[in-house]
Structure formats: structure tokens, C-alpha cells
Amino acid sequence: MAFQKILSLLKPHLNTINTLSSLKTSAQVNKGCPQIHASVGLHRFYSTTQTSTAPPAGSENHSLLENLRVLGVDLKMARQRQPGVLRKNQTNEHGLAEFLSQKGASREVIASIISRFPRAITRSEEHLEERWCLWRNIFQNDTEIVKILDRSPESFFRSSDNENLEKNILFLTSLGILPQDLSKLLTKAPRVFSNSLELNRTMVELLQSVCVSLGGQDHEGFARNIITRNIYVLIRSTKRVTANIHFLLEALRLNKDEALNLFQGHGAQILDLSHNSLQRNFKSLQNKLKSLSCRRSDLKNLVLNYSQVLFVSPETLNAKLDCLLQGGIHLKWVVEKPKVLDFSVITLKQRLEDLNALGYDFEKNGIAVLDMSKKRFEAKLDKLQVSGC
DNA sequence: AGTACCGGGTTCTGCCATAAGG
DNA sequence: CCTTATGGCAGAACCCGGTACT
């Protein structure tokens, strides 16, 4: 079926999907935050590097450079990333440093943050307070936020639009995403919150429209399931997600129920694979199975039951399959119990050796023994050694 | 007791291109 | 022209264990 056509058919439905209908007032988001007053002095914010003699346009602000040096900033890195910031004559590096320090960031962390995302020093005191406060709606303490900033300064500082951030939080909440999932989202994919509301909304609407086009009843739940199972989906482009969904529908000839289950189940994770990787991995798997005279339905079942298989590079996957085949495992058992593919070649090899040495009968006992945790496998092996097979 | 099913944890940023705004 | 804001991209597994079922 032509996916584009389906998408175009459901345009009318999109109007009925009012994802913002339950937006709450901003008072609810700001609950627990100290009230921020817009009138708090701008002069204070700009006081740190107010140079008496403005540098000539196009050259760097030397007193700013000196301040940054004192803070331990890697000027070479900063210059390479955002050269314009070093030419500004009104910045807030001391305010930022003090602010982060009060939140528990070490001198090294602060220096690293500024080095990697210099524009951070252009944010005002009140802006920082407000943004931090919005993040604190989602986290229990400051330490967690500092850790994220240290990991990815850009995620926090790239956007100066606090209102947009607030709208994003309200939007995601309105989708029924639970606080714990929201916190997971902000921890692992902080960029989601710096996306424009429109961008996030577009992705959500895409997901919902996919559900509707597949005849699903609960388009909101569908989108929510995908987002909570694949927290990175909102930092992907709709182009990529659309291409991947389209490709899987066609390549596996999925019917509507199969597709609905796949995408909001384990398949959610493979939607954010780059489109080329998905195609390459799929084609490689297809060829491999064909060369082993598998049926088309085997391929489909394998992907439906264990879509992570498409995440694995051709090289690794072929190595695993070869290892299993060499160890006396039939491919059809793998198709039935694909979870064995979770394990590394080294682990599989070792387990096959251990079991074959004991004369383990896979035909009779199945291969589930291969995908146990290490602890359970060893216990199992001990028992087999005592009792024989 | 052993197994099947299922979901969880880990950490996913840093760079580039382009639009927007001045 | 400049800087800032925003969107987009590449890269690609392995393991653990709770709990319900038998």
C-alpha cells in the first residue's frame, strides 16, 4: 500500500487531533519556583564585562578574554566554536559562573561548559534563573541538571526562548506523558526541550496520523507509546521517521495491525535509525536469510518478534548467525527465539562450547538456554554438569 | 524449580547548514 | 555583512533480573 497516499487521505483527521487542548496554565508549571520578576535589573546583568573603552568592531574583547582565562576557559576551543561571542562587549560570564557554582558545578565543569558553548555567557541572570526553574519542575535536585549541562551544554543554552521551553513541557504533559517519563526524556534527550514547540508538535502529529492511517483507535496513546519507548524520536527529523515507517511497511508487507503493534512496541526504537542504515541492515539480513534458504515469512517474523535485529550492523549480525550455525543451531530456532541475538559473539561462542562439550541437545531442549543472564546461565551449567544431559 | 515473557539500564552529542533577525 | 536560533545529521549492542506461569 502506498503510504504517502494514506497520509494524504487522513489530512482531514489531523484537524480533529487537538493535542494542545488540555494545556494547563503557566501557574501550574511554575509551581514551586520562586517568582521571577521581569524588572530585575538589567544593569546588574551587564555589569561584569562592561568595558570602558569599547573595542573596535571585528576584534576580540580583551577584558572578556582575560575574564574567561581566569575562569579556566579553553579560549581556542571557544573561538573555534562561536567566535562572535568573544567580540561582544556585554557578557555575563561572572554571573553565569557564580550561578552554576551555586548549583553545585565545579570550576572545571563551568570552564568546560563555557569552552564548549560560549554563548552561555550571553544569558542574563534572570534568564538563567527562569530556565533553571523550568528544568527543576522536572528534576528532584540541581545535581541532576548540572550533570546534564556538563554532558551537553548546548542542550540547555542553545535556545534563549524560555516561553517555548515552558510550552514544550506543557505540551508533552498534555500528551499524557508521566512525570517519570518526562524526566527520562529531559535527561537522555535534552534537546527535545530546546526544539521549537512547532517541531515537536509536528512529530507528534506525524505519529498520530500514522496511527489513524493504520486504522488505530487511540492515536494519542500510540504517539505516547512511541515517545516513551523511544525517547530519541523527538530529536529525529520527520523526514527520517516517515522514510523508515514507509520502508518497513513496504519491505515487510505489514498489515495494519502488525504495523501498529510493531511501531508502538519494540519497533519504536528502530524508527530513529538513519534511513540508510535501516535499509542497509535490512537488505543484508534479507540476503543472509535467503542464502540460508529461509522463507520470506521467516524474515518478517524475525523482525516482528525482535526488531532490534535491524539495529545490528551487517558485519556483527552475520558473525553472530555464523557463530550459531557453526555451533549446531538451526536458523529456524533462531527465528523462533531471536533473543539469542542480543548476546555478543564471544558470549555465544563460549556458551555453545560449554554446552556442546556436555552434549547438550538443542533439538530436544531448545535454545532458550543461550539467552539467560550470566548468573542464570552459570547456575544452569552447574546443574547440567552434575546431572548430565 | 525451572522457564517464558517482558522491560529496564546504559548515555546520545557535537558539529554543520540555513533561516531569522539586526 | 554580522550573530543568533534552530533543524538536521551520523553512528549503531549487550546484558540483567523481576515476576507470572507451569
Image: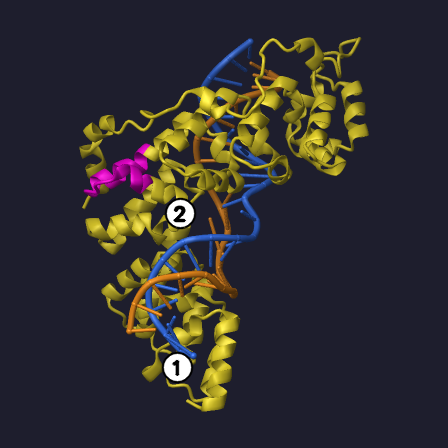
Chain colours: A yellow, B blue, C orange
Residue A41 - label:
none
In the displayed structure image, the side of residue A220 where residue A129 appears, left or right = right
Determine the image quadrant of residue A132: top right
Circle 1 sits on which residue? A328
- Magenta segment range? A205-223
Q: Residues within 10 Å of mark 2 (few under 14, many from 20)?
A: some
Give the residue type that dot 1 points to.
Gly
Give the letter of the chain under mark 2: A
In the displayed structure image, the side of residue A305 where residue A182 appears, left or right = right
Give the letter of the chain under mark 1: A
Q: Nearer the viewer, mark 1 or mark 2?
A: 2
Q: Residues within 10 Å of mark 1 (few under 14, many from 20)?
A: some
| A120 in relation to A248, above or below | above
Q: Alpha carbon of mark 1 to alpha carbon of mark 2: how far?
A: 35 Å
Spot occupied by residue A212 in the image (x, y as percentages of width and height):
22, 38
Q: Secondary structure at mark 1?
A: loop
Q: Residue at x 20, y 48 (%)?
A: A256
Visible residue check, residue A159: yes
The quarter in which the C terminus of chain A is drawn is bottom left
Give the residue type that dot 2 points to.
Arg
In the displayed structure image, the side of residue A155 where residue A10 appears, left or right = left
Mark 1 and mark 2, same subunit? yes
Q: Secondary structure at mark 2?
A: helix
Spot occupied by residue A188 in the image (x, y as percentages of width and height):
52, 42
Spot occupied by residue C13 in the image (x, y as percentages of width and height):
49, 60
Q: Residue at x 50, y 67 (%)?
A: A344
Circle 2 sits on which residue? A229
Pick the front one: A59 or A300: A300
Q: Are marks 1 and 2 in contact (CB under 8 Å)?
A: no
Spot occupied by residue A200 in the image (x, y as percentages of width and height):
40, 31
| A43 in relation to A9, above or below | above
- The answer to if A208 sits in the magenta stretch is yes
